[in-house]
Amino acid sequence: MDEFDLIRRYFAPLASSPGADGLRDDVAEISPGLIATKDAIVEGVHFLPDDPIATVAQKLVRVNVSDIIAKGGKPDAALLALVWPKGRASEQLGDFSRALGADLARWGAHLVGGDTTSTPGPLTLTLTLFGRVGARGPVRRSGAQVGDDVWVSGTIGDGLLGLMAAKGAFGKLSAEANNLLVSRYRVPEPPRLAFAELVAAYATGSVDVSDGLVADAGHIAEASDVKLVIHAKDVPLSAIGGAYVSNAKATLSALLTGGDDYQTLFTASASARAEIERSGQTVTRIGFVEQGAGVNVLDASGAEMAFESAGWTHFSGPAEA
């Protein structure tokens, strides 16, 4: 049983309000115009024990911000649950709180409450982030239509490369290369706030890319009862990501399924293509929606790519493609 099966079996029956959408999405609509999301990060699972505490605070904020932006919303108020290890230096709390406050402000949000406790276990942090959306409400995963284009913001794969670098997978790197890669993992860069306006105006279905591009495309496909077709050659990679694939230090398949990108994957009518391209946002068209089910990723020759896993899920490890 993976996390999605667990949610469907045990918790979806408890979510009776229409705004909960059966727990099938990343946000709940609390009332018209108000949405909320909650993500937790755990030491040793979502960040490394020796990561600087300030970057841990930034990551906590941004994994939640990415959910709000992907729904066409902008962050507002936040609640923090801090579960602090008894053996971790209390002096780090100052650095944590300063970084948390600065990053919340960067995304237009502010802290309004929460809870603090201690634990003999790993550092565990949870943020509940509220956001504001327009009259249309949040853009769900379930709105993709046959004939839509598939788009993604930013670049894909740097989160995985950064984790690999932090673990020494690339051997001895220059300080500059190592710092660049590791920073991509420690401090994700979701789309800017203005991207939410693009999503709100044009997206039919949308999700943040946290578990892996292929896995998260699958969430839209399942919720919308369609098939997403993605051209791998069109998926945007950073310069360093492209170089690592070219030098066979990492595979394209790994970057497409690695996760920790926190970009926005969305579908939109083909009639909106020109407006999206003229928006000034960093966004790339990578495929289309057709009848069927699941996700087909095509290589440069047009052949379907096979994946050992589509991305990460908790409880059962990698999700099956």
Image (cartoon, grey):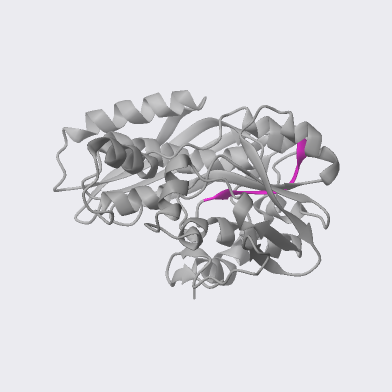
**Who is closer to the viewer here, 105 or 195?**
195
Q: Residue at x 51, y 48 (%)?
A: 156
In the image, residue 241 lies in the stretch drawn in magenta: no
- Residue 109 rendering spot, x and y as whole percentages: 50, 27
Q: Quadrant of residue 70?
A: top right
**60 on left or right of 84:** right
- Residue 255 rendering spot, x and y as whole percentages: 47, 56
Whether residue 264 can be seen here: yes
The span shown in magenta is 201-209
- Residue 207 rendering spot, x and y as whole percentages: 62, 49
Q: Quadrant of residue 94?
A: top left
Q: Residue furthest right?
A: 271
Q: Quadrant of residue 303?
A: bottom right
Q: Residue at x 29, y 52 (%)?
A: 43
In the image, residue 206 lies in the stretch drawn in magenta: yes
**190 on left or right of 28:** left
Q: Which quarter of the rendered picture does the C terminus lie within? A: bottom right
Q: Is residue 166 above or below residue 16?
A: above
- Residue 73 rendering spot, x and y as whole percentages: 64, 35
Q: Is residue 129 above or below residue 110?
A: below
Q: Is residue 260 above or below residue 96?
A: below
Name the main secondary structure of what is drawn in magenta. strand
**Who is closer to the viewer here, 40 or 233?**
233
Whether residue 42 can be seen here: no
Report the label total: 0
Q: Residue at x 42, y 33 (%)?
A: 113
Q: Residue at x 80, y 62 (%)?
A: 290
**Who is closer to the viewer here, 221 or 181?**
181
